[in-house]
């Protein structure tokens, strides 16, 4: 299950971003890392080709240019504890030029709570040396070395980017000043227990090439006025989406041609369909047409050095509920450095005397501040909590800060998750509970004490999906010690590992390709923490696996974590969690955007409580005759693929092997029976190829049909100068006038099409293909293509409404004639039919070759700019762009919610739903929405409530329908008007009397099996009934569902 689309897509538009720092984006930030410092060290990596098989999903997030700039950055990461290894993992997966790991410390017990590449046998060894071979395996294109010497100024000049974790404030300032004056980018990242800090300095003139990471917008024009500020009106099919201050350029404008290909013009938005541009009063008159496209303008951002930024920090706010927190933590972190300098250690976990001393140091630090960093008053509770947990080291916090740091996106950022601590006001842990025990969880015990550790070990969790989010979750589970005792994590995923997964599903290696994801991930995590109990399954979750994931299974769970890539499976798991009343951790990513939703029984709404609007589909007539964008021609090419190489072979196979196929087909509505039988006849008789030559001839004739004949027929029906009934040109606005293509063996695109189509056609009939282009050219010269003359009386539908209202008459005599001419089903052995399933990631199978050629030829028909293979694959393959950094950060937040669930937090405000866009950067945290309340009589209920009805009575007999209806009347004063189970209607007040009489005295389960025509499985302990009810005043009332227990 690859990456998951945002489970709730919220567009973070520019207007909301102004709260963030005016810094950079995924595309940008990763950008100028390549400026060669004065030392000339950076040998540019631009000559290296990008491995699209490995980086494809990330390329769709960053683009080729940003990726090339990344590939010329030598990165130093100092400090290889949990945070350092997290940043190193993300940067190596991202594909920089080289990574050097620096650490002078040795592995200790407390490191193991989050440093996933250290093992117990590594204690006492240098952290960088031990981590190096394990990190190097992540990406064979990135050389990874370790260094254990001192970080002298001379040594730093080898790098374009320096990342400091786990360093003293004096070191940070010394290296910060040196990096700033030498054009080296600096990132300082630190985590202390539940608190995190991030600072970036990318120099005084960093160029940002893309401030939001979104695709450039474009719109079709209907009018442009001549004015001192010309007003452009767009077609009212969709809002233009531009904002004032955006830059645009124009193409295909007729009349006012001065605008075509102009330098980018700044616009002012006047409304959803209009905006103003420059002075157009001297331009020619606008006639019609035109496309306006947004241009991303480079922007220069200046960063201050760490030392000058300390006194006047610019904070990036992550949580509006804590708007004063960054300033407090800015002082608090400086006080921690002072404490450490004085005592050569951090404050002891939950030591009150150390907390008091840190508070006094914080007051001193604050008194010494001169600029805006000075706080009016220090928040004693926060500073003391910082002292209590500072010695801790938590995997989820490292994952979140490490994901952000690797995307290097902001100036100053402080983050905390103190809601993870106990909800009780006066709860204070003792030093004994949190003292180090020389065990691998010391870093976590320092924050939460040993009781939580025991609870975590007993948890049983179900993880659905082992893709990008699944891998990150498993790593954090292992570090936290989830299911490290008598608990268990069950992970299910029916997918195998593909090369394109390796760029972000970091538990997998090149030698794992084609193995099962769930088993490989489970084995990889066991190496990180051998005591974790993980079981891998290969099942899809859904109604067909309810025998496996049955009542006993769900009832034994403590919770569920989704790591899915589609909304349907998410909704299904959500329904199961509501029914079994289990907490659900839901998350998703889309490029640089990510979100986290936590679902808590009896407290919050569920995932399905709110839904995204459905995705817009392309009208059929647009696809068939009037495309105006490359998306339309690509969808058309995908439909061609299914309709030529999959559907016909499937139908013909069914005709040959399934006796009931004909009977089923004849029952289809409208003209479908004739269409299907015609298609089977073509597949098995008229178009049946006997050789490679036949396949080439078929492909050549099909080319002629699609790119010449059909276009000529369309232009015969609607000539270029055709007018509509209102006198407007027919070919205008979204309708682009096409032109036919003439076939030539000298045209590479024409040859690509024939080569791919003929090979796929051969494959679908079990014939051998060929890749010999010169032989193909010879064959094509001998093929006779029949002459075509456009016919009169051919109906072409202009809109989908017209298409729907056209009643197709069915020609019965033709149908009978075809039935007699089809080969007999006994002859099935002589046909070798192989339907072809579309697979986008194999470059040798001709699938993408066909899509790209078919789409770009059609684009040429309609003068639509073509798309390269990379872009075509994204759109036709419906690929979800994905990058390791977003996944790591999102999963860090998920695991903080998990810590709250395990402790049994009861308050809604303790939990946080999160949404982020690392490209802007933008963060929004909010408490989850409470479960909506409903009412009947005086009884309040939510989606978590239900009626519990025991089907088996005390006498051992099962309830009949009559008894069931009476039970609700007597016990709940509700008169049931309708009763259903799934899609089966069991009872309704308007049911015919005879049917009702027959059912009233039957047991409930018998009615269910009778109506649904399905037996109840042995695993079914209870049934769910939905009710419509009236109360005593005959008013219709909304009531919960019924859980009817039968075993």
Image (cartoon, helix red, strand yellow):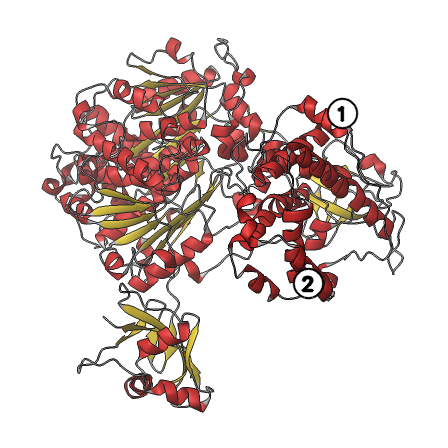
Question: Picture coordinates of residue 924 (x, y %)?
Answer: 44, 47
Pointer 1 with pointer 2, Cβ within 8 A: no
Indicate left or right for 487 with 545 as reference. Answer: left
**929 lies above or below 179:** below
How far apart are labels 1 and 2 at the CA level? 45 Å
Can residue 376 be seen? no
For mark 1, what is the residue?
Answer: 746
Which disc is residue 622 wearing? none
At 50% from the left edge and 29% from the top edge, which residue is drawn?
53
Indicate left or right for 354 with 246 as reference. Answer: left
Residue nearer the viewer, 573 or 662: 662
Q: Quadrant of residue 1036?
A: bottom left
For mark 2, what is the residue?
Answer: 816
**499 lies above or below 8:** above
Question: Picture coordinates of residue 978 (x, y %)?
Answer: 42, 81
Residue mark closest to the camera, 1 vs 2: 2
Residue nearer the viewer, 613 or 575: 575
Question: Picture coordinates of residue 1 (x, y %)?
Answer: 41, 43
Indicate left or right for 123 with 981 as reference. Answer: left
Badge 2 crowding class, 10 Å Cα cut-off, few under 14, some 14 to 19, many 20 or more, is: few
- In the rendered image, which quarter contains the C terminus? bottom left
At 30% from the left edge and 65% from the top edge, which residue is drawn?
1017
């Amino acid at each position: 299950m690859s990456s998951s689309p945002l489970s709730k897509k919220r567009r973070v538009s520019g207007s909301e971003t102004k709260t963030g720092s005016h810094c950079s984006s995924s595309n940008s930030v990763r950008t100028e890392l390549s400026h060669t410092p004065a030392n000339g060290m950076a040998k540019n990596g631009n000559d290296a080709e990008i491995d699209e098989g490995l980086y494809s999903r990330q390329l769709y997030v960053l683009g080729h240019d940003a990726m090339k700039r990344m590939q010329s950055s030598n990165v130093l990461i100092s400090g290889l504890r949990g945070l350092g290894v997290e940043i190193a993992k993300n940067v190596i997966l991202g594909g920089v030029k080289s990574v050097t790991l620096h650490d002078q410390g040795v592995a200790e017990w407390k490191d193991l709570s989050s440093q996933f590449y250290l093992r117990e046998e590594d204690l006492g060894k240098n952290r960088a040396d031990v981590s190096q071979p394990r990190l190097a395996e992540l990406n064979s294109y990135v050389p990874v070395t370790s260094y254990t010497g001192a970080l002298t100024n001379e040594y730093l000049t080898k790098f374009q980017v320096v990342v400091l974790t786990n360093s003293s404030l004096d070191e940070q300032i010394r290296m910060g000043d040196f990096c700033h004056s030498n054009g080296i980018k600096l990132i300082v990242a630190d985590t202390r227990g539940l608190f995190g800090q991030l600072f970036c300095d990318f120099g005084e003139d960093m160029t940002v090439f893309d401030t939001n990471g979104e695709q450039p917008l474009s719109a079709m024009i209907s009018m442009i006025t001549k004015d001192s500020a010309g007003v452009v009106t767009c077609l009212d099919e969709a809002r233009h989406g531009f904002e004032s201050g955006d830059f645009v350029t124009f193409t295909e404008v007729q009349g006012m041609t001065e605008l075509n290909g102009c330098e980018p013009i700044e616009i002012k938005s006047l409304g959803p369909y209009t905006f103003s541009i420059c002075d157009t009063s001297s331009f020619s008159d606008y006639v019609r047409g035109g496309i306006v496209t947004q241009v991303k303008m480079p922007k220069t951002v200046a960063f201050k050095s760490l030392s000058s930024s300390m006194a006047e920090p610019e904070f990036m706010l992550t949580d509006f509920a804590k708007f004063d927190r960054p300033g407090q933590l800015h002082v608090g972190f400086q006080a921690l450095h002072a404490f450490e300098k004085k005592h050569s250690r951090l404050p002891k976990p939950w030591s009150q005397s150390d907390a008091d001393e840190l508070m006094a140091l914080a007051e001193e630090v604050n008194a010494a501040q001169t600029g805006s960093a000075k706080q009016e008053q220090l928040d004693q509770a926060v500073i003391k909590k910082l002292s209590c947990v500072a010695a801790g080291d938590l995997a989820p916090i490292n994952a979140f800060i490490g994901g952000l740091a690797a995307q290097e996106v902001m100036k100053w950022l402080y983050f905390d998750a103190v809601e993870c601590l106990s909800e009780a006001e006066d709860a204070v842990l003792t030093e004994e509970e949190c003292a180090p025990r020389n065990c691998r969880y010391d870093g976590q015990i320092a924050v939460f004490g040993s009781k939580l550790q025991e609870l975590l070990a007993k948890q049983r969790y179900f993880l659905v999906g082992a893709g990008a989010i699944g891998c990150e979750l498993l790593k954090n589970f292992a570090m936290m010690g989830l299911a490290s005792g008598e608990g268990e994590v069950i992970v299910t995923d029916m997918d195998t590992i593909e090369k394109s997964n390796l760029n972000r599903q970091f538990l997998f290696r090149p030698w794992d390709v084609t193995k099962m994801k769930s088993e490989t991930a489970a084995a990889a995590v066991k190496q990180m923490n051998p005591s974790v109990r993980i079981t891998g399954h290969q099942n899809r979750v859904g109604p067909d696996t309810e025998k496996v994931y049955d009542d006993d299974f769900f009832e034994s769970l403590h919770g569920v974590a989704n790591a899915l890539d589609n909304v349907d499976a998410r909704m299904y798991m959500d329904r199961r969690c509501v029914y079994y009343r289990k907490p659900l951790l839901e998350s998703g990513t889309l490029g640089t955007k990510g979100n986290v939703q936590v679902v808590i029984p009896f407290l919050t709404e569920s995932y399905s409580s709110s839904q995204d609007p459905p995705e817009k589909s392309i009208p059929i007539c647009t696809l068939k005759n009037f495309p105006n964008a490359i998306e339309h021609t690509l969808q058309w090419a995908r439909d061609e693929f299914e309709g030529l190489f999959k559907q016909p072979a499937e139908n013909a196979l069914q005709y040959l092997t399934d006796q009931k196929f004909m009977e089923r087909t004849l029952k289809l509505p409208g003209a479908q029976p004739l269409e299907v039988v015609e298609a089977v006849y073509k597949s098995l008789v008229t178009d049946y190829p006997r050789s490679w030559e036949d396949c080439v001839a078929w492909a050549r004739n099909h080319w002629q049909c699609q790119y010449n004949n059909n276009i000529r027929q369309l232009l015969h029906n609607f000539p270029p100068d055709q007018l509509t009934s209102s006198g407007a040109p027919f070919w205008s606005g979204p309708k682009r006038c096409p032109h036919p293509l003439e076939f030539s063996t000298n045209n590479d695109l024409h040859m690509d099409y024939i080569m791919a189509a003929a090979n796929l056609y051969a494959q679908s009939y079990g014939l051998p293909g060929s890749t010999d282009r010169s032989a193909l050219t010879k064959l094509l010269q001998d093929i006779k293509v029949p002459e075509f003359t456009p016919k009169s009386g051919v109906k072409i539908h202009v809109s989908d409404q017209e298409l729907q209202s056209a009643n197709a008459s069915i020609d019965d005599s033709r149908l009978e004639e075809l039935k007699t001419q089809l080969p007999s089903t006994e002859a099935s052995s002589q046909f070798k039919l192989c339907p072809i399933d579309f697979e986008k990631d194999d470059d040798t199978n001709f699938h993408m070759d066909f899509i790209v050629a078919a789409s770009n030829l059609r684009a040429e028909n309609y003068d639509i700019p073509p798309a390269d293979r990379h872009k075509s694959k994204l759109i036709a393959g419906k690929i979800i762009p994905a990058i390791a950094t977003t996944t790591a950060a999102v999963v860090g937040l998920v695991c903080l919610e998990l810590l709250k669930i395990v402790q049994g937090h009861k308050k809604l405000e303790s939990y946080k739903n999160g949404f982020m866009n690392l490209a802007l950067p933008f963060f929004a945290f909010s408490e989850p929405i409470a479960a909506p309340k409903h009412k009947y009589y005086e009884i309040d209920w939510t989606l978590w409530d239900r009626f519990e009805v025991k089907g088996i009575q005390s006498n051992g007999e099962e309830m009949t329908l009559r008894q069931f209806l009476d039970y609700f009347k007597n016990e709940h004063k509700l008169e049931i008007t309708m009763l259903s189970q799934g899609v089966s209607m069991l009872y309704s007040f308007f049911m015919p009397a005879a049917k009702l009489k027959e059912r009233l005295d039957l047991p409930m389960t018998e009615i269910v099996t009778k109506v649904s025509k399905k037996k109840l499985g042995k695993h079914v302990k209870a049934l769910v009934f939905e009710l419509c009810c009236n109360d005593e005043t005959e008013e219709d009332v909304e009531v919960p569902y019924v859980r009817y227990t039968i075993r």
